[in-house]
Amino acid sequence: MVDNLPAAIAIVAMALVTLLTRLAGPWLMRHVPATPRVEAFLEAMSTSVIAGLIVTTLLHSGLREGGAVLAAMAVMWLTRSAVAAMATGILTAAIWSAVAG
Amino acid sequence: MVSNSAIRKTTPKARFTLIGVRRGMLRLMPVAIFVIPFGIGFGAAAVQTGVSTTQASVMSGLVFAGASQFAVLDLWQSPLPLFSLTLVTLAVNARHIIMGAALSGWINQLSPWQRALALVTLSDANFADTQTSLRSGDPEIGYLLGGGLMLWMAWTTGTILGATIGSLAGNLDQWGVDVVMPAFFAAVVCGDLRQGARILPVITAVAVALLTVDLLPAGWNIIAAAVSGGLVGAVQHGR
């Protein structure tokens, strides 16, 4: 067990660094002119960062998670409902776990 | 002044209202419900690593960034390696900088204090939700804070539960709760594409994330993916 004082210092350091990452983006962009091309960059980047997150999560998992995400995408494409897509993903993964153990 | 009028033309006037915050909370409720088991998982893992119940709960309340909190558990030993711990936190959370930059056109219209308040709970899920609505022409920043508060409550509550009675919960993954986040993000990407986002940046991002995951320190492959996708989008612009 780590003592409370060093633990508190570590937690505060983590919190400050994380807060910094949250505030930094818009602050940095104040120094970049908002040309249409910069906006195209930011717009493509905002979908891309989410795509990168999905890929990285799925790399650390398996067929079950991949299947669940594909099912969720299909339902989103058909219904445009994120809640329906998530429910489908959960259901797919739960059934997979029940059947495959 | 030229750049100023360009902002006006492409970015509608941002709003930051209490109604928006409340609606943001409701919008992310279905996601937040499933963040509770994630929190339970973190709380239980933290206690197993030797983090006390109080330390784990305070960490979730103040840091509120799950991936980095799981990452530092690997480093949690006496004496604490403060420097590596801070560096790992920075690396895993650096994607917030990208997300903040992506929202800057709207966020930077607010006063400095409103800006800080809007960003204090910025995380993956409320970013994903808010960028969709901003892009579709609803310039409400309150969704970001509201959604973030909802996620924060779920994450902190889950951590406290997990750190106190985590051993009783058993393995929640068999119910499929572990796929909620990737499923939600996949739905958001799908929605963006249906709204007219170009596919080439997304394909580029996927490829770069895959190719760099083993080459870069944890977390940086997502940033490489985001920036590459953004660059492809910038090159494509006007074609």
Image: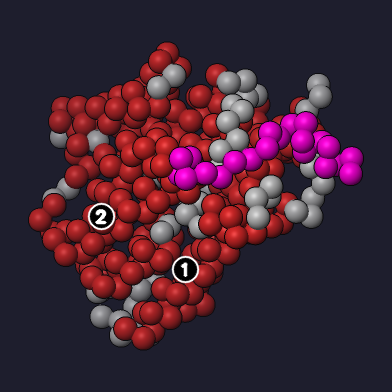
Q: Amino acid at mark 1?
A: Ala
For the question of whether residue B101 can be seen, the reply is no
Q: Residues within 10 Å of mark 1 (few under 14, many from 20)?
A: many
What residue is rendered at 69% in x and 57% in y? A27
* Chain where mark 2 sits: B
Q: Label 2 sits on what residue type?
A: Gly
Magenta residues (range): B1-21
Instruction: Give the number of callouts.
Output: 2
Alpha carbons under labels 2 and 1: distance apart:
18 Å
Asked whether residue B237 is in view, the answer is: yes
Where is residue B173, by image quadrant? top left
| Location of residue B82 in the rendering, given as x and y in whole percent from the top left corner | 47, 79
Residue located 59% across and 41% down the image:
B15
Give the residue at mark 1: A15
Q: Quadrant of the N terminus of chain A?
A: bottom left
Q: Is residue B10 magenta?
A: yes
Q: Quadrant of residue B136?
A: top right
Q: Is residue B44 above or below residue A89?
A: below
Q: Measured from the top left, where is residue B154 in percent x and y?
A: 30, 51
- Image coordinates for residue B73, horizontal then vertical, percent: 35, 67
Residue shown at 30% from the left, 85% from the top: A3
Tell me the quarter of the picture where residue B6 sits: top right
- The residue labelled by disc 2 is B158
Are discs 2 and 1 less than 8 Å apart at CB?
no
Check disc 2 and report its element: helix, strand or loop.
helix
What is the x, y in percent for residue B218? 50, 56
